[in-house]
Image (cartoon, grey):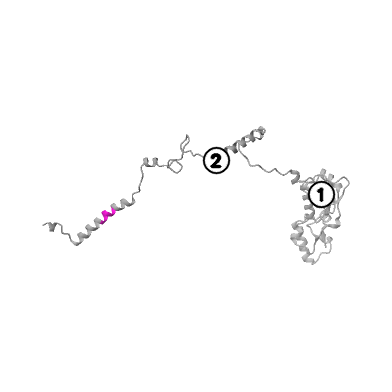
Amino acid sequence: MWKDFFYFSKRERQGILILIVFIAGIFVGKFLFTPKTQSIAENEGTKDVNGNENGAFKTSGKENSVDMPTSVSTSVQRKNSDYMTRNQNLPPEKRTYYQQAEKPAAPSQTVLYPKAEKFAEGVVIELNVSDTTQLMKIPGIGPAFARRITGFGKSLGGFYRLEQLQEVYGMYEELYEQIAPYLRVDPNVIVAIPVNTASLDKMKAHPYLNFYQAKAIIEMRKKKGRLENISELRLLEEFTEADFERLAYYLAF
């Protein structure tokens, strides 16, 4: 009877064996993977190598505060003391409440923009060969006007008379009258436009020629093959007598 009670088929024996292995695995896993913890009392009782309690810094009246090493603290105090002593010796308007890096002295305006030596009364220079440095020596002319004068002269090819300075941007009558005695003009140094070979862009870039006038010259040049003198341009309706008067110095045939 008892033998019949403990009799198991092969399939039942396999199932029981698997169940036993599973239960044993649970206990073994719990033992292996459960972290080991120490009691709070044990943690509080341990000390580090410096004599402080583990898990907390040594406090000095406030929680979580950190004591500086004595040498570092002394050095900081000495630097602060020296700074405060220097600060108190300064006038009130120059005192600061924080340390500032010393700033290099700003360069003098005289060094950045040296004052140009001016010509004495009676000095006269040639306008068409003068650069900005020479023009700045004329009383009343600064860097801006010197650049404008030389720039306008370059675009023209040179000045043929002194009155053309009145066409410079910003030139006013009083300034012109002030600087005129220091200047003279030689029209022989003017660089003229070669009418028979110059491109359309070259011609229209001149202050006294617009696009339509430059194009009319190009078209006439194509028809005639070569232009001999400025009189031939009088046939073109794009020009006036005033145009011919001032262009006479700037067109080379």
Residue closer to the observer: 204 or 7? 7
Name the spot of residue 211 as percent of width and height, x first.
74, 57
Per the rendered image, the range of residues in magenta is 21-26
At label 1, the amino acid type is Leu
Residue 74 in the image: above or below residue 167: above
Residue 135 is labelled as 1
- Determine which residue is flagged by label 2: 71
Name the spot of residue 25 as percent of width and height, x first.
28, 54
Where does the C terminus fall, quadrant-wise? bottom right
Q: Residue at x 31, y 53 (%)?
A: 29
Image depth: mark 1 or mark 2 in front: 2
Q: Are marks 1 and 2 in contact (CB under 8 Å)?
A: no
Residue 193 appears in which quarter of the rendering? Answer: bottom right
- Characterize the local packing of mark 2: few (<14), some (14-19) or many (20 or more) Cα atoms within 10 angstroms: few
Residue 93 in the image: above or below residue 2: above
At label 2, the amino acid type is Ser
Q: Residue at x 20, y 59 (%)?
A: 13
CA–CA distance in space, label 1 to label 2:
68 Å
Where does the N terminus fall, quadrant-wise? bottom left
